[in-house]
Image: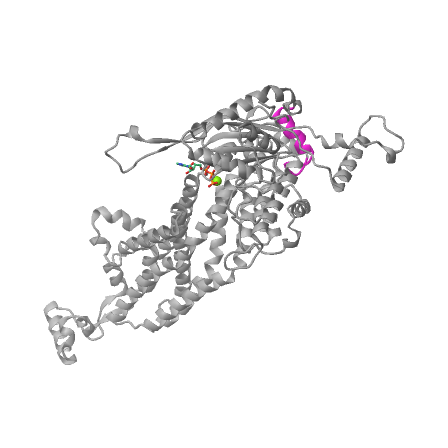
Amino acid sequence: MQRALEEPHCTISVGSPTLVELLTDCDSFRKEEDSSSVARSDDPAHSIIDVEALHVKPVRFVLAFSNLEYNVTFRRWFDFSRPRSSDTVKTLLDDVSGEACDGNILAVLGASGAGKSTLIDALAGRVAKESLKGSVTLNGENVLESQLLKVISAYVMQDDLLFPMLTVKETLMFASEFRLPRSFPKSKKMERVQALIDQLGLRNAADTVIGDEGHRGVSGGERRRVSIGIDIIHDPIVLFLDEPTSGLDSSNAFMVVQVLKRIAQSGSIVVMSIHQPSTRIIDLLDRLIILSRGKNVFSGSPASLPNFFSNLGHTIPEKENITEFALDVVRKLEGSTEGTRELVEFNEKWQQSNLGLSQSARPTPHGLSLKEAIIESVSRGKLVSGSSSGATYLTSMETVSSYTNPSLFETFILAKRYMRNWIRMPELLGTRIAIVMVTAFLLATVYWKLDNTPRGAQERLTFFAFVVPTTFYLCLDNVPVFIQERYIFLRETTRNAYRTSSYVISHSLVSLPQLIAPSLVFSTITFWTVGLRGGLEGFVFYCLIIYASFWSGSSVVTFISGLVPHIMLSYMVTIAYVAYCLLLSGFYVVRDRIPSYWIWFHYISPIKYPYEAVLINEFDDPSRCFVKGVQVFEGTLLGGVSDMKKVELLETLSRSLSTRITQSTCLRTGSDLLSQQGITQLSKWDCLWITLASGLFFRILFYFALLFGSKNKRT
Ligand SMILES: Nc1ncnc2c1ncn2[C@@H]1O[C@H](COP(=O)(O)OP(=O)(O)OP(=O)(O)O)[C@@H](O)[C@H]1O
Ligand SMILES: [Mg+2]
């Protein structure tokens, strides 16, 4: 067999340096010279610079993985006829080994379903430890065990999850606020963002909004580069990317890989999966791993790929894209009866034969331990951490801080980002206020100037029974808000950009002012037109309780959208829940008539309290009369008799009861009405506080739903 992998496993492949690179290197070389005590030429202009030496950079980091194996078990949940032992085990990764060094791009190739994303996930620590066999080490240390990998690495997902209304610069600026420490001055953060914009080739798009289906924004390639940018804002040492080029045209894909190459050359390890790279892209890759059904069928440099396949008896024709050819061969073998077994074995032998060869040239990562290598990298400006404390910050792996900023600062930045997004979409607030106004006008016209007759009292009750659940239903627009943001939240929290608690607090804080306008609009339109009681004081309380009701409703909806991450399901659950709460809130069935086994639901119904509060505000006045004299016959069989007869009936009633009941005698006051509704236990202020507290309670539940329901790891 011909010698195959003549290069060491990790090399810095160097193309001819560009003038800029040479100048940069010369510059840094001079600086190093200046600071060293080594004797040098008196005339610096005539220093002899060894161009080759400049470009042979030492290897500082080696990410090695060996014998990775990952199985998943299918459970047949509804097939009770089969025993548990019939669960099928599927092997997603089968004995995969390899390594990657800083300065290099390791590309994982393979057909769809080969296990590329699974391998990237396994290396990035996104697979539960207990499910993954084998080892993943960085400079010989098991990084999956510690929090360290989260701090020094970044994972770029395949989807571009960005806020559509922020510009490229703002998006990167917010990322810098989250990922760079607060001690880092704003000007430095801006400098870093500007450098990144240049590095990503986004200068022309810096002030363009990201955009979405409804708003014109940056191009697909630019969006992808912004996605990469937000994850590399802190200049990570290890960068994982799942198909960063998919969905892009060839020139955009090439630009993205060029950017990745620059990142690698700045001292990072880049590991990515890629579908059918073009020849230009292959030239930028340093190492390839080809997977077939979870098995490693090739591992080596792109240059050694033709050699490997010709040894196997498949000579790659000239002008053919080598990876396309290789993948075609793998696909054919996968379809054959023998499968890829021969190829896997051949690859193993190939690796064995090269192991000895490359052992001598194998990178001992500059003799540095992981800690030392990180500290050295930080001192060179990697892992932007603000100050010299950045190095000490990483010196102890045990005490490595998971979050860059304090909770309060995170909350502030999150709230700022949310408000900016919100302000850029005035149509959202406009639509909400418009719906509230239409609802209020409709109610105002239907319940115009209610009087104090028995019918008026009844209509007041139905008015309130409609108003309170409506405030809850008007909050349904919160369902998509969180669900759309959910993936951004997941992406950011898995990278420890901020704490879940900061997110929940900022989310709650920004919703509070948002609810003021709808509450005021609704209360002002309905209070005077419907003819509610209490004057200014009654109006103020009515505003407060409507506001509290909106707050409680928005909290319920937010909690359910955090619990049920599917939009349609979330709507269904919310509507059903509000309907049950309404049924048991005391309007349709008074408390005494609710079955004892459902009484608990009556008390936990968040609709009960605002409903009782508005009724107390309206009816809690013993001097206010709703049934006077002959009005007592209204709505009964006697309601149809003449007024004369009614007066006579009243007199007969007075005689038989020995009480004087005249036309002006009040037979039902507001307080009677409240007792009849079973509203006797709490004051209106108690109800207001409980409504506000229930909003808070649902926000706490929202926090737990996010904390326990948003695990972003494979099991
Ligand atoms: N939880 C799971 N249970 C069962 N099979 C799974 C699970 N997760 C992934 N798979 C399977 O594992 C295989 C590898 O999946 P993976 O996503 O890594 O493929 P891929 O190479 O990234 O494909 P693509 O190029 O389409 O993204 C696929 O066949 C997939 O169906
Ligand atoms: Mg994939």
Residue at image location 48% in from the left, 58% down from the top? 514
Task: State the residue in front, 524 or 14.
Answer: 14
Percent x, y of residue 446? 32, 72
Q: Is residue 627 shown above or below 687?
A: below
Q: Is 263 or 560 nearer to us in this picture?
A: 263
Q: Residue 84 appears at what percent x and percent y?
A: 29, 30
Quarter of the image for the N terminus: give it. top right
Instruction: From the viewer's side, name the closer residue of 399 and 19.
Output: 19
Residue 192 % position (x, y): 66, 44
200 above or below 351? below
Instruction: Determine which quarter of the picture holds residue 21.
Output: top right
In the image, residue 524 above or below residue 33: below
Q: Is residue 485 left or right of residue 203?
A: left
Q: Is residue 469 left or right of residue 381?
A: left
Classify residue 38 by image quadrant: top right
- Judging depth in this view, the residue of 349 and 180 nearest the camera is 349
Q: Based on the displayed image, in which of its 4 quarters is residue 447 positioned?
A: bottom left
Against 592, is 86 above or below?
above
- Which residue range is magenta in the image? 368-387
Query: In the image, is residue 65 part of the stretch drawn in magenta?
Result: no
Q: Percent position (x, y) of residue 22?
A: 76, 38
Quarter containing the C terminus: top left
- Say how the picture is coloured: one colour
- Label count reads 0
- Can residue 399 be seen? no
Residue 590 visible (yes or no): yes
Q: Is residue 379 magenta?
A: yes
Q: Is residue 689 left or right of residue 196?
A: left
Identify the residue shown where x is 35% and y is 73%.
445
